[in-house]
C-alpha cells in the first residue's frame, strides 16, 4: 500500500475525512468534532457579511486564496512562493478561513488538556503533533509500557533500556533514506546554515540556496521513523517509573550498558566527557550538568534528575532536551532549577526530537536562539508542570515552528515571565525595535520553504509576556502560530522593556507585528480565557492580517485593556479580527475593525477585498473617547465592522 492510501486508511479509522490534492493530504471538517467556544464568532461574522451583501466577496477571497495555494503547491511556483515543506493541516486551515478560528480554539484546548494529564496524555499530545506534520500517529500505546501501578526498580531499568534501544534503532532508520554523503552534509551544515547567522535575516536564511538544500534533505529523511524514535521515550515520564527510580538506595555512581546511576550527592556531570552514556539518572542533590550534546556522535540521550536545585549549562547546540539530528529527553522531577544554554536547547530540535519536562519548582530558562519549544524538521516539546518560571531567549523560541517543525512550550501553572527578543535589530529599517520571532509563532524562511507550527500555552497565573517583532501568536510565510493563556490577569507588554543582557535598550521600545498577527499567507491566533488582561504594542497587532491569511485575538472573559489605537484589521486581501466576550473593556482608539481601503498586492476584483472585525459582546466599553455600546459601524471599506453587543443572542442591526 502506498503512503497516501495508508494515510487515508488510518484517517478513516480515526473518523477524519480527507481530500488528496496536489500531492498533499488536506484535512476537512467532520461532524464528529466537539463544539467550539468560537462557533458564535463564526455566526457573527457570517451574519455581518450577509447584512452588507458581502458573502460573495468573501467567497471570492477564499477562492482566490485557494488559487494562489494551488499555484504554489508541490513543484509549482508563483512569484517567490513554492510548495516546499507545506503542511496539510495549515493548508486546510487557510482554505477554510471562516472555520479556522474554531479549529484553532479546539486544537489548543485539547492539546493543553492532554498535557495536564498523565504520561498517556503526553503521548496523545505527541501524536497530535505527529499528525500535524503529515505523519501517522501510532494508534496503540508503546507495547512495553502496558503495566500500571508500582514498578520494581529492575523493571524500570529494563523499560528505560528498551525505550532507548528502540529510539536508537528508529533514528538509524530515519537516516537510512539518505545517502552517506547526504548524511554528512546535514551533520556538517544544518546548524550552520539555519542558526549560526540567523540574526542576519530573521525572516529567511542568509544563504537561500543552502537553506533550500537543508530543507530538502530534512524532507527526504524518514520523518515517520524520526518521530517514532521520540515517541518511544515518552513513557519514561510515567510517574510510576520515576517513583521506582527514586527508591533506589545506591550512594555511588553505577554504570551498566550505557546507563549511569548517580547517588544523592551534589554531583558535577560533564556529559560530553561521557559519550558512551545514553541514560543518566541522578537520584538527588544540587547537581551541575555541563553540555550533554545530542548529535551524530550520540544521537539518543535521556537525562533524569529526581530532585534538588540543579544547574544545567553549556554552549554547544543540542543540549538540555535539545537535538541536532538526534533524539533527546530531559526530565527534572523537583527543585528550583537553572537552565543556561545558547542554541537548540531546552526542548528544541533541528532534524530530530527534543523534549524537556520539568515537574516542579521555580525555574529559569535562558538561551539565545531556537530554545524552549523550538522545532525545525521534527517535534520539540518544553513542558513545565508547576512553579513560577522565567523564560528568556532572543530568537526562534518559546513555541516556534520552522519548516517541517512542530514546536511547543506549555507551562501548566504558576506566575510566569516570558521574554523574547532584545538583542538583534528588527528586519525592517523604517521603525525601531528588535527581532523576536517567538512565543507561539510559525514561520517559513521567505522564498525558501513554507513554515511549521508554533504553540505557546500557559495554564494559569498572572503572567507577563515581553516580545519583539514578529512574536506572540503569529504566522509568517505559509505557517501557523498559536498562543493561549487559560487563566489569570495577564500582561502582554508589547516590546521588551530591557535589552537581552539586562541593560538599557539601544532601540526605542516599539513592537511591530506582535500579539495576534499574520503576514504573507500566515495564520496567527491568540486566546485568553480568563482574567483582566492588558495588550500592548505599537502597530500591526491585536488581530492584524496582511496579505492573504487570518489573524485573530480572542479574549473570553474579564475587563480588558487594549492599548493600541487599532486592532482587528485586514489589509492586502487579509482577514483579521478581535473578539472579546464579557467585561468592561477599554480600547486605545477608534480604528478597531478597520478594513483597508484597497488591495495593491493582488487584483482586487479577484481577491474580494479586505475583511476586518472588532466584535465585543457584553459589558460597557470605551473606544478612545467614544462609547459605542450596542452599536454596529462600518470601519474603513465595506468589509470593516465594529460590532458591540449587549448579549451574544442579539443578531439584529446590521449596517
Image (spheres, rainbow, N blue to C red):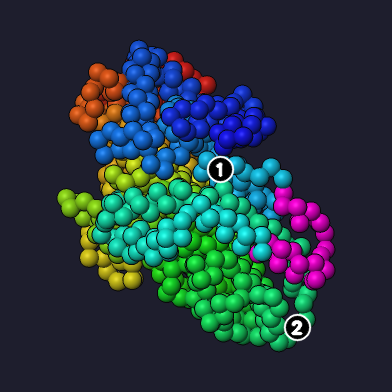
Q: Which residues make up the magenta segment? A: 141-164
Mark 1, Cα crowd under 10 Å, few <14 / some 14-19 / many 20+, is some
- Dot label at residue 135: 1
Q: Main secondary structure of the magenta part?
A: helix
Disc 2 designates what residue? 250
Residue 122, position as x, y percentages in the image: 64, 52
Instruction: Name the residue: 36% across, 30% down.
Output: 69
Residue 107, position as x, y percentages in the image: 55, 39
Residue 53, position as x, y percentages in the image: 35, 12
Instruction: Name the residue: 24% across, 53% down.
Output: 427
Q: Is residue 428 above or below residue 323?
A: above
Instruction: Name the residue: 71% across, 60% down.
Output: 238
Instruction: Name the residue: 42% across, 32% down.
Output: 94
Tell me if residue 156 is in the magenta stretch. yes
User: In the visual, does 159 lie left or right of 403?
Assistant: right
**In this orientation, which residue lies closer to the viewer: 398 or 62?**
62
Amino acid at each position: 500500500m502506498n503512503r497516501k492510501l495508508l494515510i487515508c486508511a488510518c484517517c478513516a479509522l480515526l473518523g477524519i475525512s480527507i481530500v488528496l490534492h496536489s500531492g498533499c493530504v488536506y484535512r476537512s471538517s467532520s461532524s464528529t468534532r466537539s463544539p467550539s467556544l468560537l462557533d458564535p464568532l463564526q455566526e457573527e461574522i457570517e451574519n455581518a457579511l450577509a447584512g452588507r451583501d458581502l458573502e460573495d466577496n468573501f467567497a471570492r477571497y477564499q477562492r482566490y486564496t485557494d488559487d494562489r495555494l494551488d499555484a504554489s503547491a508541490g513543484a509549482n511556483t508563483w512569484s517567490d512562493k513554492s510548495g516546499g515543506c507545506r503542511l496539510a493541516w495549515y493548508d486546510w486551515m487557510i482554505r477554510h478561513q471562516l472555520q479556522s478560528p474554531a479549529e484553532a480554539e479546539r486544537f489548543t484546548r485539547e492539546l493543553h488538556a492532554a498535557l495536564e494529564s498523565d504520561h498517556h496524555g503526553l503521548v496523545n499530545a505527541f501524536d497530535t503533533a505527529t499528525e500535524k506534520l503529515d505523519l501517522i500517529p501510532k494508534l496503540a500505546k508503546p507495547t512495553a509500557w502496558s503495566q500500571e501501578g508500582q514498578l520494581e526498580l529492575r523493571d524500570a531499568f529494563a523499560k528505560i533500556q528498551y525505550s532507548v534501544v528502540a529510539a536508537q534503532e528508529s533514528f538509524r532508520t530515519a537516516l537510512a533514506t539518505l545517502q552517506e554523503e547526504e548524511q554528512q552534509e546535514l551533520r556538517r551544515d544544518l546548524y550552520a546554515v539555519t542558526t549560526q547567522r540567523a540574526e542576519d535575516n530573521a525572516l529567511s536564511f542568509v544563504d537561500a540556496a543552502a537553506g533550500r538544500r537543508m530543507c530538502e534533505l530534512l524532507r527526504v529523511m524518514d520523518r515517520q521513523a524520526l518521530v517514532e524514535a521520540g515517541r518511544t521515550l515518552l513513557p519514561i515520564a510515567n510517574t510510576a517509573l520515576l517513583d521506582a527510580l527514586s527508591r533506589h538506595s545506591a550512594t555511588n555512581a553505577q554504570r551498566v550498558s550505557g546507563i549511569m546511576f548517580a547517588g544523592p550527592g551534589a554531583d558535577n556531570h560533564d556529559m560530553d566527557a561521557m559519550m558512551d552514556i545514553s541514560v543518566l539518572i541522578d537520584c538527588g542533590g544540587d547537581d551541575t550538568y555541563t553540555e550533554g550534546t545530542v548529535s551524530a556522535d550520540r544521537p539518543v540521550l535521556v537525562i533524569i534528575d529526581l530532585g534538588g536545585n540543579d544547574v544545567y549549562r553549556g554552549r554547544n547546540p543540542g543540549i538540555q532536551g535539545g537535538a541536532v539530528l538526534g533524539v533527546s529527553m530531559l526530565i527534572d522531577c523537583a527543585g528550583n532549577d537553572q537552565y543556561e544554554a545558547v542554541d537548540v536547547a531546552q526542548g528544541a530540535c533541528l532534524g530530530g526530537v527534543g523534549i524537556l519536562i520539568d515537574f516542579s519548582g521555580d525555574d529559569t530558562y535562558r538561551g539565545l536562539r531556537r530554545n524552549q519549544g523550538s522545532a525545525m524538521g521534527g517535534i520539540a516539546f518544553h513542558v513545565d508542570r508547576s512553579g513560577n518560571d522565567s523564560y528568556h531567549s532572543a530568537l526562534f523560541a518559546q513555541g516556534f515552528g520552522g519548516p517541517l517543525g512542530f514546536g511547543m512550550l506549555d507551562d501548566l501553572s504558576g506566575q510566569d515571565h516570558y521574554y523574547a527578543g532584545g538583542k538583534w535589530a528588527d528586519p525592517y529599517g523604517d521603525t525601531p525595535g528588535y527581532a523576536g520571532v517567538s512565543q507561539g509563532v510559525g514561520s517559513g524562511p521567505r522564498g525558501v520553504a513554507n513554515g511549521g507550527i508554533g504553540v505557546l500555552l500557559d495554564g494559569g497565573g498572572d503572567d507577563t509576556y515581553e516580545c519583539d517583532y514578529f512574536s506572540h501568536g503569529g504566522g509568517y510565510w505559509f505557517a501557523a502560530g498559536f498562543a493561549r493563556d487559560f487563566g489569570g490577569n495577564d500582561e502582554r507588554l508589547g516590546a521588551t522593556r530591557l535589552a537581552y543582557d539586562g541593560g538599557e535598550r539601544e532601540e526605542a521600545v516599539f513592537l511591530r507585528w506582535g500579539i495576534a498577527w499574520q503576514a504573507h499567507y500566515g495564520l496567527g491566533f491568540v486566546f485568553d480565557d480568563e482574567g483582566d488582561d492588558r495588550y500592548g504594542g505599537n502597530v500591526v497587532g491585536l488581530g492584524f492580517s496582511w496579505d492573504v491569511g487570518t489573524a485573530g485575538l480572542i479574549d473570553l472573559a474579564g475587563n480588558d485593556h487594549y492599548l493600541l489605537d487599532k486592532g482587528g484589521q485586514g489589509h492586502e486581501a487579509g482577514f483579521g479580527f478581535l473578539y472579546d466576550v464579557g467585561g468592561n473593556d477599554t480600547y486605545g482608539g477608534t480604528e478597531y475593525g478597520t478594513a483597508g481601503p484597497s488591495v495593491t498586492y493582488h487584483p482586487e476584483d479577484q481577491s474580494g477585498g479586505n475583511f476586518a472585525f472588532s466584535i465585543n459582546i457584553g459589558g460597557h466599553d470605551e473606544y478612545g473617547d467614544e462609547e459605542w455600546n450596542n452599536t454596529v459601524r462600518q470601519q474603513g471599506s465595506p468589509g470593516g465592522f465594529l460590532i458591540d453587543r449587549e448579549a451574544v443572542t442579539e443578531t439584529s442591526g446590521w449596517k
